[in-house]
Image: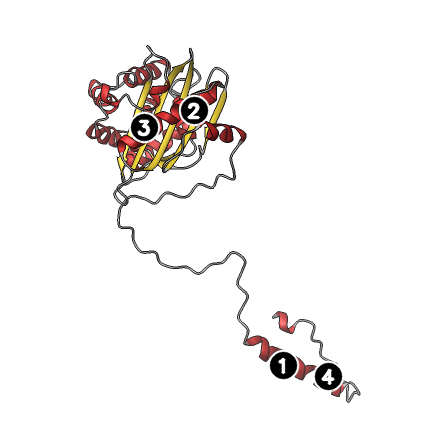
Amino acid sequence: MSPAREGIHRAPRSGPSLLAPAAIVLVCATLLWLVVSGNRADPTPFGAAATTTAAPPESPEPTLPPSHTPGPTPTETALAAALPEITGNLSVAVLDPTADTLVTYNADRPYVTASIVKVDILATLLLQAQQANRTLTDTERSTAAAMIETSDNDAADTLWSAIGGAAGLRTANTTLGLTDTEPTGLSWGLTRTTAGDQVRLLDAITAADSPLDAASRAYLADLMTSVQADQTWGVSTAADPGTTPALKNGWLPRDATGLWVINSIAHITHTGHPLLIAILSDNQPSMPAGITQLESAAQAAVSAAAGTSP
């Protein structure tokens, strides 16, 4: 029943009634209301919006969703005060696994991984091998070494296919405890992640209670401490002198803008105790400029985590 007709009651047809003129007036008024209301547009439901067809992007690279972080936490505020003036976008997460304390800045903002995802690819391969009750083949080991130590992209392509691509990475990440890393079928380097999730990955490949067994964790650490010399920049600058960080960096110029993604993740020793640190950035004007900013941020971040001055 239409709402416009609710409440209308017909008089019984038992004969003439003195109420007939009033009923006629009521009916006429009702018909007039229906005519007027019929010309009104239906109200727009709350939250509805017109749909439009967006033009296809000029680049196959996906558009990243904006950050929806509600506001800075006290640790974010403290770290932000210690950070240098930031160019582009930058996010930090530092976990002290001994004290179980986490210091972050903008840690939920998504970035493309570039080559830091190669650590995740190898962790996935090792996890799959464990589940199949086997060890890596000699070919897999040499390919993994090239992927991590020299950041060889062809080696990454090979192992990306071996793990089952995006689906394989996604499944392994569920087991490893990652919640904000989303691979894409376009390219392993365009996997989206956050600084917070990269610290979770570092924890998963170093902690004794990891889904990865001790042999797998030791193998990852061995490769990440053997990165070739020209790729040892990044968060390693915050490590104690004489120590060797377990490190992986990523760098990528974006097609659409020409600006750079500069990322660095590592397990380091700072003031004698271990720290897991991930710094991600994008919209950097050049690779050298991005590296310089990232390294300054690493110094400030570990100082904030340790409660000392940079």
Task: Give how far across and how far down residue 136 sits, in percent.
Answer: 26, 19
Helix, strand or loop status at disc 2? helix
Viewer-proximal residue, 235 or 101?
A: 235
In percent of width and height, residue 229 lies at 23, 19
Observer-side mark, 2 or 1, equals 2
Label whose residue precedes the other's in the sequence (4 or 1): 4
Q: Are marks 4 and 1 in contact (CB under 8 Å)?
A: no
Q: Earlier in the sequence, mark 3 or mark 2?
A: 3
Residue 259 relative to residue 205: left or right: left
Q: Amino acid type of disc 1?
A: Leu
Q: Is residue 129 visible?
A: no
Circle 3 — which element? helix
The quarter of the picture where the C terminus appears is: top left
In the rendered image, which residue does mark 3 sit on?
292
Bin the neighbour count of mark 2 within 10 Å (Cα to Cα): few under 14, some 14-19, many 20 and up. Answer: many
**Marks 4 and 2, Cα distance to the nearest angstrom?**
81 Å
Residue 46 lies left or right of residue 147; in this view the side is right
Report the amino acid beneath label 2: Ala
Q: Specify the amino acid type for callout 3.
A: Thr
Q: Tell me the quarter of the picture where residue 199 sits.
A: top left
Q: CA distance from mark 4 to mark 1?
A: 12 Å
**Position of residue 178 in the picture relative to residue 255 (left or right):** right
Q: Which mark is residue 301?
A: 2
Q: Is residue 114 left or right of residue 108?
A: left
Provide the secondary structure element on which disc 1 rests: helix
Residue drawn at 53 percent across, 63 percent down: 44
> Which mark is drawn over residue 31?
1
How far, Cα to Cα, is label 2 from label 1? 73 Å
- Residue occupying image coordinates x 24% and y 22%: 144
Measure the alpha-carbon separation of dots 3 and 4: 86 Å
Q: Earlier in the sequence, mark 3 or mark 4?
A: 4
